[in-house]
């Protein structure tokens, strides 16, 4: 599913990733943990094709993403990868339903199909009655669940999440974490989640520890 080999990355004279090898299987829920500044977000952005490594190889869903031109890469990302960030990054002027539909539109789906899929996802998240609310009319937990639905609308091979529950209280946090496992159990969804939450890390299938730009075995 995801294979990365020998990934290195520097920002100026600071080497942030010092040779990362990692394999993630379909349907795995993997957590990435480590101290602040260890390189977790950098690694996630590289795996998610939002940033390029200085050296190494990355294949996602069987595609050597380093070989894709930037246009092809945007299409690939839209079709195969979902993202969830610490802050929902929903568009404030659109409803929950519309926010979820946007990546489907970008991927060329028609309104009826995009809407059907978005409504299914909202229903799965227990948010059917919030479809027409704008983000400022939703709670923090609801906004994050809408962000997860948006990440899933195009049936991505993998969802990369960077501290997805970092801004939630303990109840919403627990609900969001449960949602990841429900989505895996029901749909075989693969998740790679950067987190500082020890409980979440303890219940994932596997935890990758990053320390000073390297995987600590
Ligand atoms: N675009 C950039 N330009 C320069 N330095 C950067 C850039 N992005 C990250 N860094 C540096 O790279 C190092 C790793 O950053 P990264 O964001 O990957 O850490 P992290 O493990 O996600 O930390 P945190 O847990 O605080 O989110 C840090 O020292 C950071 O300051
Ligand atoms: Mg980070």
Image (spheres, rainbow, N blue to C red):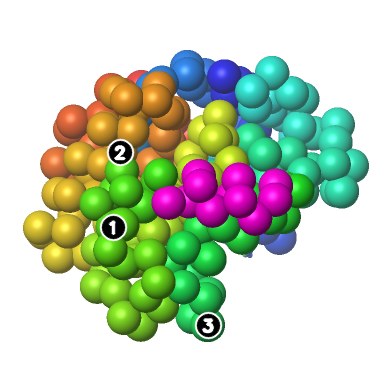
> Is residue 53 at all visible to an observer of this figure?
no
| Residue at horizontal 41 percent and vertical 34 percent from the top | 191
In which quadrant of the rendered image does the C terminus lie? top left
Q: How far apart are marks 1 and 2 (CA)?
A: 16 Å
In the shown orientation, is residue 102 left or right of residue 12?
left
Q: Which of marks 2 and 3 is nearer the N terminus?
A: 3
In the shown orientation, is residue 11 left or right of residue 115?
right
> Is residue 68 at all visible to an observer of this figure?
yes
Is 33 rendered above or below residue 190?
below
Kindly indicate whether the residue at mark 2 contacts the one at mark 1 (C-beta within 8 angstroms).
Answer: no
Dot 2: what SS? Answer: helix
- Which region shows up in magenta? 109-119
Is 203 rendered above or below residue 43?
above
Q: Which of marks 1 and 3 is nearer the N terminus?
A: 3
- Disc on res. 93: 3
Dot 1: what SS? Answer: loop
Q: Distance between the residues labelled 1 and 3?
A: 19 Å
Report the residue marked by disc 2. 180
């Amino acid at each position: 599913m995801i294979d990365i080999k020998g990934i290195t990355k520097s920002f100026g004279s600071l080497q942030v990733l010092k040779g990362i090898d990692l394999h993630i299987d379909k349907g795995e829920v993997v957590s990435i943990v480590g101290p602040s500044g260890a390189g977790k977000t950098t690694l996630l952005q590289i795996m998610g094709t939002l940033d390029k490594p200085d050296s190494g190889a990355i294949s996602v869903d069987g595609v050597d993403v380093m070989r894709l031109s930037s246009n092809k890469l945007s299409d690939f990302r839209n079709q195969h990868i979902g993202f969830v960030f610490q802050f929902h990054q929903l568009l404030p002027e659109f409803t929950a339903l519309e926010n979820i539909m946007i990546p489907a539109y970008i991927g060329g789906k028609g309104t009826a199909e995009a809407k059907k899929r978005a409504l299914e996802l909202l229903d799965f998240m227990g948010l059917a009655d919030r479809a027409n609310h704008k983000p400022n009319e939703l709670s923090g937990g609801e906004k994050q669940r809408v962000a997860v639905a948006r990440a899933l609308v195009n049936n991505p091979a993998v969802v990369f999440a960077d501290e997805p529950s970092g801004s939630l209280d303990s109840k919403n946090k627990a609900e969001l974490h449960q949602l990841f496992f429900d989505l895996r159990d029901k749909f075989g969804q693969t998740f790679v989640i950067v987190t500082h939450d020890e409980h979440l890390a303890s219940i994932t299938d596997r935890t990758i520890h990053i320390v000073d730009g390297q995987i600590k075995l």
